[in-house]
Image (spheres, rainbow, N blue to C red):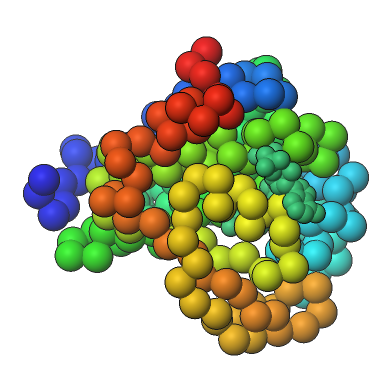
Amino acid sequence: MPLWRPRSGRHPGWPTPVGPLRVDAGVIELRPPRLRDGSAWSRIRTEDQAILERWEPSAEVDWRTRHATSVWPGLLSGLRAEARAGRMLPYVIELDGSFCGQLTIGNVTHGALRSAWIGYWVHSAVTGGGVATGALALGLDHSFSAVGMHRMEATVRAENAASRRVLAKTGFREEGLLRRYLHVDGDWRDHLLVGLTVEDIGGSVVSRLIREGRASWS
Ligand code: ACO
């Protein structure tokens, strides 16, 4: 595979929808975010403030102001600009055709590194049904194939048992502890660094979930 192959104005793997995949909760798909996602994004993130704030980076502006529907268009154009520059692949996670969370692939680097980070959140109304695991598996397979990544990384707080389980189910290996890595929930928090390379996945992360009975093609 060539080290870097930009395609006439388009970056590899974007803006391609990924899936659909059936998990216990229903049928999930990753698709690029749209302007009309603003009201669902605002409603769900406002509802889940207490859950999300524990794990997400701190910001100067308070949660409600930062998640008003009117904020979405500016946020979306920032995500699209990063995507056009080839640095990011921002996805919405859909469950049975409705917005239920986000999955983001960031700091996409080509050349001899071919690496990126991946992160996600899912509406609390639908957690526990394999949505994050399925979405992460779809995002990883897409990153390793269409985007051409060799290594994927994520960071997670040790206390975030649900997310650590999601990472473990998709094959991530814990590689180290990043001391006082990120300002989250009022303080600088240690994070575990987890990683996965294309050699680790044995072809496809989704196939692994299917073999284990956690998912099926829809
Ligand atoms: N302790 C141990 N395991 C737990 C706990 C807990 N307190 N809560 C849930 N789990 C397990 C579930 O049982 C399940 O494992 P299983 O299939 O073996 O039973 C697993 O965690 C959850 O798997 P999914 O159902 O695929 O995940 P879900 O759709 O519920 O989403 C997520 C999980 C993304 C962590 C969601 O709860 C969320 O959005 N949380 C808030 C935001 C967040 O933490 N995002 C991740 C930040 S780190 C990162 O992005 C790399």
Q: In the rendered view, does 167 fall on the left or right side of 45?
A: left
Q: Residue at the front extreme? A: 212
Residue 43 visible at all = yes
Name the residue at 72% across, 58% down.
161
Name the residue at 65% across, 34% down.
131
How far across and how far down the image is residue 205, in percent?
42, 38
Q: In the rendered view, does 210 fall on the left or right side of 100?
A: left
Tally of numbered discs: 0
Determine whether 97 is above or below 191 in the image: above
How far across and how far down the image is residue 137, in percent?
48, 38
Q: In the rendered view, does 208 fall on the left or right side of 155?
A: left
45 or 21: nearer the eye? 21
Residue 35 visible at all = no
Name the residue at 29% across, 49% down.
198
Q: In the rendered view, does 140 fall on the left or right side of 127?
A: left
How far across and how far down the image is residue 65, in percent?
85, 58
Q: Quadrant of residue 192?
A: bottom right
Q: Quadrant of residue 134?
A: top right
Determine whether 217 is above or below 84 in the image: above
72 or 114: nearer the eye? 114
Q: Residue at the top extreme? A: 218
11 or 147: nearer the eye? 147
Name the residue at 52% across, 13% down.
218
128 or 78: nearer the eye? 128
The quadrant of the image that shows the N terminus is top left
How far across and how far down the image is residue 151, in percent?
33, 58
